[in-house]
Image: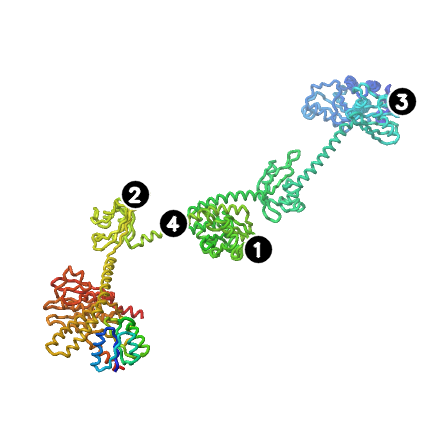
Amino acid sequence: VGHGVLHQPDVARRLGQIYEGSIISGPAGGVSYFPRGATAGTVFLDAVRFLAETLSGATAAGLPGVLMKDAQMKDICAAAAGAMEAAGCRIRFSFDNARDAAPVCAAFGVDEAALDDFSRRRLDELSREAITRGEALVVNRPAGRPDDATQEYGRAWWKSLLVVPLAGGDGILGAMELFDKKTGGRGFTAADAERAGVLASVAALGAGRLAALNRSERDAARAEKRLEGVLNSSENAVMILDSDNIIKYANRPVGRWIGAPEGEKTPVGRLCLDVFTEDAFSPCRTAAKSLAAGRACTEVFRRAERVAEVCAHPVTATGECVITIKDTTDLTARRDEIVKLYRKAAETKVRLENLIGGSADGIVTLDADGKVTSWNKSAEKIFGYAGSEILGSFIPFLPNVTGENKKEFLELISKGETLHEIETRGYKKDGTATDISLTISPVKDIDDAVTSLNIIARDISRHKIMEDELIRSNQRLSHMIFISSAMRSTLSLDKLLRMILTAATVQDGLAFNRAVLFMHDERRAMLTGAMGVGPSSRQEAVKIWRNLSFERKSLPDILNEIEQGPLREDSEFDKLGAALEIPLAFDTYFSRAVAEKRPYNVRNARRDALSPAVVTNGLESDAYAVVPLIAKDKVVGVLWVDNLYNERPITGDDIEFLSNFADQAAAAVENARLFEQARMAENELSNIFESITDLVFITDTDRRVVKANKAVCELTDLPMERVIGRRCHEVFHGQDTLWAFCPNFHVSGRVKAAVSEVEGFLNGSAETYSVSMSPIFDSHDAVKGMVHIVSNVTEIKKLREQLARTEKVAALGEMAARVAHEIRTPLVSIGGFTRRLAEKIEPPLNEYTDIIIAEVGRLEALLRQTLGFVRESKMSKELVDVNTLLRYVVRLLRHSFRGEVLIEERLTTESLELLGDPNRLKEAFINLINNAHQSIEGMGRIIVGTRRQSNLAVIEIEDTGKGIDKAEMKYIFDPFFTTRMQGTGLGLAITRKVIEEHGGAIEVKSNVGAGTIFKINLLLKEVSNEGLNS
Amino acid sequence: MKVLIVDDDPHLRKLYEEELLDEGYEVHIASSGKEALEVFAKVNPDIVTLDILMPGMDGIEVLRKLKDQKPGLPVIMSTAYDYRDDFSVWASDAYVVKSADMTELKSTIKRLLQKK
């Protein structure tokens, strides 16, 4: 075998199979080929030798990690092309066993430029195929059809191709491409492929060795470099000590620990103890410890400000020790810092927890879905939920936030907005509402995403209550102002009082449940209930409070409401209140309120002796307040209030408010009272003025009527508007000029009142008027006008005249009676004895006695008549038929009449019955008929007639006598007035007296020379009335 | 028959006495109320004529006392003045206004006595 050494049994085997008997040997352990039968060409063998030698030479040169030189490769290509009689050769080669398209690394006799892209890719594909299959590939382009070949292989210059894979011991490393066989003319044959295979094997063998060598050297270098890099890049110092404590390796950071400038003094090769001399920092000691212990050992050294952690790992197999030195200064510091931070955080946490726990605000955290994740004590207090109940549920205390709402709510907050102090209404576990203020802030993570929500809920119900209270006070105040203006608007006391009570009870007024107003009756020393306003039951209370409000209502509306609403007059409570009476004589809160002029707030009234029973029992009140109504320093009344239904305690504020209100109310009451009095007085005056039957009118200085009463209109028959403004003489006399007899004429200009009696006051009427005139003065004592009081005194005048007459008669009569009495007695003696004498004497003497007797008789008759007139006789009342009576009288008198006087009866057939004294009436009629008879001289006629005129009996006695002189007419009814020589002069006086006693009237009409008619009216007895009455 | 005439006027007493004596009566007279009662007690008259207006006890008082003692006694009130409207004279049986003509008085006495 010579000097050939078979390195690769596989190659040798293949070579042996192909070339039996031939041998090729190389000087440096190359390839030996032993051809077996066929004789190899010299060129081929030379090529193999060249190859083997080249490769061996390269190997011998010991150039690990270096790629074969281009020139060498090109030489190989040339040798291969020569050996295979080819025009060109390319070698594809890759160290990385890239069987795929190994890159072309050398070429000989190939025109690369003539290859287009397609041809190049096609060649790559053919090589890949050969490499993949591990077999030689022969392509001979057909001569005749260049186009087809072009289509398949590209527009290449080559005509034949042989690709052989380069198969080495580690696999296929590449391929050898041989182009255009020069000899034979038929291109490459299978024999060529075999021979090329041998060449390729030899080339591959060398290349494989090269590659392997190359690869291992490169890997080792890389590994060392990598390790070095790793070690150097480490912050930690790493050393390796051998068993002799000599530093075998030290990385760069070790330098930092030995104080040497970087890379200057490497400690490698020095004794560890020489390098690390300080006792305070001795990695050697650690190493010794670890070696002694047989396991890793760690020690911490502190030097100056630095801390080092030395770790020794013993490598027991070699006695070596790996030491790492870690600078933990920063770490320690950081750890300390962390501990500090942690401690701080812990403290903060505790503080926070305390803060949260002890905070008066409810602090709640929610996750991104709005579920509660934490819940502090105050939240528990505010909302009533225990933490355990509420964790994980969706903010139940804000029931308004649900569903869609909830999304919005969360969205708003998840945008990162913080909602500050939103005042809203929260709900407690028991469902009651409470006013809360919420501050909701998002909690963000590092990425600024909202992960949870923080809610601070502040219970502002108290605050709210106070705020509400303030608002309410304000409202109350404005309502009070409104009410007081309303109160001033009415002067009707009743309406005002009701308004006061309503204000005390209406919800947005003083808001008491009930109120009773007591008026102070000073005379009786009593507080008397005037009225009460309030519901009479709890149900009614609720209804009233819901409906009644001063809000947005006009004044007329309220007044209307007061009159028509449930608080109207005559409500149950009103009646109850109005019936109360509290005497001030006893010591009670009421009497004290009146006496001390201060309010009392009474609690526990039932157990309080100073609380009157009418209040505790009658009004069933246990807590109430009494406030005096003080006007002009006088207590005009007491306002009583309580809260029976809602049991709200009456506060000092309430009292103060009530007192203020009471003052105003009292002033209004006083005003209304004064007004009422004034109005009453005015009414009274007006009534008097109007109802007075006398004429009352006032004239100004121009004599124009300024004011007149109804009587003026009635008398003048003028409407009021035609009286007022006109001058008095226009009104009463219908003339433009002053009335000549006007009493005013005389009074005006004077300043004294005057009364005068005038006739013809009204348009010249005969009536008599009394005119009283009083001047009116202004504050400067100037006359402003005149008050006239005019009364028709015609009747009075008549009566007065009648009275005078009666008095005259009475006085006269009394005297007459006295005289008559004194005269009668001697007359009786004279007459009586004369009569006796007359019986005893003879004629002619008895003629004298007869004269005496006759004269005495005449005197007696005179006396009878006189006394009959005078005596105050009692009149009997009998049913008298006037006609019957007259017939009797006529019959009685007819005989005494002279023959030439005829008497005629013209009596009505109607019954004329009346109640009266028949004797007196008889006397009256006799007088009249006698008078008639006596008035007739010579022949004459008397007619006695009766008729009925409505309820009157009219009796007329007419004569054809001489009549009565006009001057005498006035006196004919006077006593003792007579025109005749005979007669008493009392006849007509008696007659009129009788008629007047019967309620009748007598008139006389007379014409001198023609006769006289006496007309008597007597009231008939009303049969129908009598019948009805009985 | 006994007639008691009471009058303060002596002439009238005389006139009445004589006239009534002529009529056949037994006539007693008294000039005052006091005397009238005394005479009445003594003679027990059948009829009395009484003047009303007298000094001292007047006729009306006498009338009352007479009627007390003897209710059935006819009493004629004889007066110069018409007192018929006076309630006090109602108790009397008749009323005669004094007159020179004694006819009425005599007939009244006669009637009352006959009635008796």
**Chain under label 4?**
A
Q: Quadrant of residue B83?
A: bottom left
Q: Is residue A492 visible?
A: yes
The span from disc 2 to disc 3 (Cα, nearest Å) is 182 Å
Point out the tag, 2 or 3, that comes first from the N-terminus. Answer: 3
- x then y, percent, for residue A542: 52, 52
Residue that mark 2 sits on: A782
Q: CA distance from mark 2 to mark 1?
A: 69 Å
Residue B92, percent from left and from top:
28, 75
Residue A362 place in picture, x, y as percent: 63, 42
SS under mark 1: helix
Query: Could you tell which of marks 1 and 3 lies nearer the N-terminus?
Result: 3
Spatial separation of the CA atoms under disc 2 and disc 4: 26 Å
Q: Is A468 drawn above or below residue A82 in the view shown?
A: below
Q: Which quadrant, please, contains the C terminus of chain B?
A: bottom left
Between label 1 and label 3, give the one nearer the viewer: 1
